Image (spheres, rainbow, N blue to C red):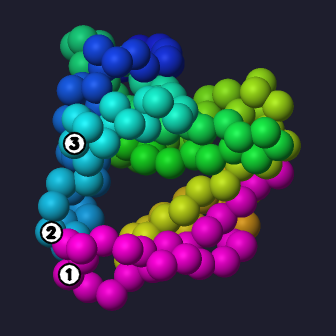
Amino acid sequence: MTNTIRTATITDVPLLVSLINAAFVVERRFVDRDRTDIDDVASYLEKGTFLIADGDGGGADACIYVEPGGERGYIGMLAVQPSLHRRGIGRRMMAAAEQYCRAAGCRAVDIKIVNLRTELPGFYRTLGYTDCGTMPFEEAKLTKPAHFMLMTKEL
């Protein structure tokens, strides 16, 4: 597991879709669809970028979406290959995304997580994120009531 982190290009879109959908399969218990598709990821690349941790076999071990926006940045879609969980790669990807935002002039970053992902708030709190509100989760394929938890971190 080399985990060289690089910036994604448009040619990485199919790789990103596959990785994100594999990592977010746990959300199938409350959303009746894949997490993303080729058009969705391509549209994210028009606004921000994905950082990718390359794996040894030519695939990707992890990715994360980063969108700097002046003094505040947004980080989302942290996706780690399920077989690689609990090895520190998620923390490393968050650190890389925060550094990317810092280098772009951001003084803080925001994330949003689905409240039904009860394992996530504690993880992000250990990285220094604090709760800062909620917002609706508007998804036609939602099978259980849910909302987003908003979290923020000063850089």
Disc 1: CA contacts within 10 A as few (<14), some (14-19) or many (>=20): few
Q: Is residue 149 magenta?
A: yes
State the residue at coordinates (34%, 18%).
10
Judge whether 84 appears above or below 131 on screen. Answer: above
Judge whether 154 appears above or below 7 on screen. Answer: below
**Towards the viewer: 12 or 22:** 12
Query: First in sequence: mark 2 or mark 1?
Result: 2
**Towards the viewer: 41 or 4:** 41
- Residue identified by numbered label 2: 32
Is there CB contact under 8 Å for labels 2 and 1? yes
Mark toward the viewer: 1 or 3: 3
Q: Which residues are magenta?
A: 131-155
Q: Quadrant of residue 107?
A: top right
Query: First in sequence: mark 1 or mark 3?
Result: 3
State the residue at coordinates (20%, 81%).
143
The amino acid at mark 1 is Thr
- Residue identified by numbered label 3: 37
Q: Is residue 100 left or right of residue 4?
A: right
The amino acid at mark 2 is Asp
Q: Assign a secondary structure to mark 2.
A: loop
Q: Assign a secondary structure to mark 1.
A: loop
Q: Is residue 53 left or right of residue 153?
A: left
Q: Looking at the picture, how far across and down is residue 52, in whole percent?
A: 43, 24
